[in-house]
Image (tube, rainbow, N blue to C red):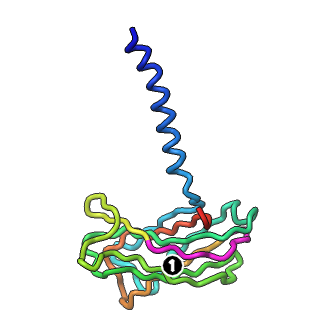
Amino acid sequence: MAKGIRRKVALPRLEQLLLALLLLVSCDGTVYHHFEPVEASGWAADDTLTFVYSGADLASRSTAMEMALQVRYGAGYEYKDLRVRVETLRADTSLLSVDTLCCRMYDDRGRRLGSTAGTMYQNGSNTVSVAALCCDAVILKVTHLMGSDYVRNIFDIGVKLTRAGL
């Protein structure tokens, strides 16, 4: 009989612990995280990927954001890193900022960086601060700066915006 009572008490505590852990992990300040697919033939030098964030956070609060690049790529990616240009524009297309982000794909010993799911890898760049975003929407235009007509073995490019300081 005592074992039955212990199980009833232990299970709710375990559920509470798991819920608390889930809440801690999910509260990282992310306000936008979206991926856009890259053409299977390769990412052309003149291809621009466009991301639109129109969250209420922008209009209601004048807050600085951190921006990071996310890359999903294949084992055949042939460069040590991926450098991109990100133009941040208001909804009326007036320019807010231009940033360069670099995502290292391999370390100095030639080992792939990031996480993997089979033959696909995912990695993120350094973050850059984006000026206080106090407009209805933000448009992010991403182009690669690799000096090649096509960058192959990239599946998706993502942009992640988080509140600064979190």
Does the magenta stretch mainly form a helix, a strand or a loop?
Answer: strand
Residue farthest along the top direction in this orientation: 1
- Read off the magenta span: 125-137
Quadrant containing the C terminus in the rendered view: bottom right
43 over 35 or under it: above or below: below
**Rendered location of residue 80, percent (x, y):** 31, 81
Looking at the rendered structure, the secondary structure element under dot 1 is: strand
**Rendered location of residue 37, percent (x, y):** 43, 68
- Circle 1: residue type: Val
Taking the spot 61% from the left edge, 65% from the top edge, the residue there is 165
With 94 as the anchor, is 161 left or right in this view? left
Residue farthest along the right direction in this orientation: 60
With 130 as the anchor, is 159 left or right in this view? left
Residue 165 within the magenta-colored segment of the rendering = no
With 34 as the anchor, is 151 left or right in this view? left
Residue beneath disc 1: 142
**Rendered location of residue 5, percent (x, y):** 44, 14
Viewer-closest of 86 and 12? 12
With 76 as the anchor, is 24 left or right in this view? right
Taking the spot 51% from the left edge, 73% from the top edge, the residue there is 127
138 over 46 or under it: above or below: above
Residue farthest along the front direction in this orientation: 2
Quadrant containing the N terminus in the rendered view: top left
Q: Place residue 161 in its image quadrant.
A: bottom right
